[in-house]
Image: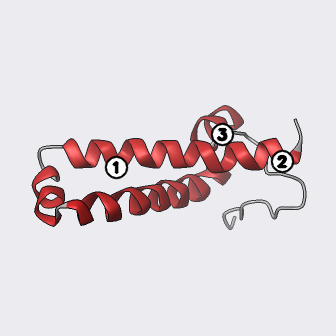
Amino acid sequence: MSDRVIALLRTLIPSAWGTALAYLLAHWPVTAPVVHLLGPLGDTVLVPLAIAAWYWAARKAEAHIPGWARAILSGHPALPTGYAPPPTPPQ
């Protein structure tokens, strides 16, 4: 698989997970009133924040999970060539 396809997958898949997370938060009975209170701004802010949170969490978890789980979270288990690998935890 080319680096361009891997990079595209590692952008689109976390964005899809973050969007799904935003949808769940917007419809979860605990958080829905807050999102509704913010009106259109709630959706405008919630989606990018959820995508950013998902991407951050997936990148932090990447060094600690097997390849198949990285593929589910990030779209592909490997980084494109030329990218720094995720930091490894101190021993």
Measured from the top left, where is residue 82 in percent x and y? Answer: 89, 61
Crowding near pointer 3: few (<14 within 10 Å), some, many (20+)?
Answer: many
Identity, as a three-letter code, of the amino acid under mark 1: Ala
Quarter of the image with the C terminus is bottom right
Identity, as a three-letter code, of the amino acid under mark 2: Arg
Distance from the alpha carbon under mark 1 to that under mark 3:
19 Å
From the viewer's side, name the closer residue of 63 and 34: 34
* Left or right: residue 11 compared with residue 19: right
Q: Which residue is mark 1?
A: 22
In the rendered image, the residue lying farthest to the top is: 68
- Is 30 above or below relative to 67? below
Identity, as a three-letter code, of the amino acid under mark 3: Gly
The disc placed on residue 12 is none
Distance from the alpha carbon under mark 2 to that under mark 1:
27 Å
CB atoms at circles 1 and 3 under 8 Å apart? no
* Left or right: residue 53 compared with residue 40: right
**Along the polypeptide, which appears first: circle 1 or circle 3?**
1
- What residue is shown at x 48% (from left), y 43% (from top)? 17
- Is 65 above or below relative to 82? above
**Along the polypeptide, which appears first: circle 3 or circle 2?**
2
Q: Which residue is mark 3?
A: 75
Quarter of the image with the N terminus is top right
- What residue is shown at x 59% (from left), y 42% (from top)? 13
- Is 46 above or below relative to 10? below
Q: Which residue is mark 2?
A: 4
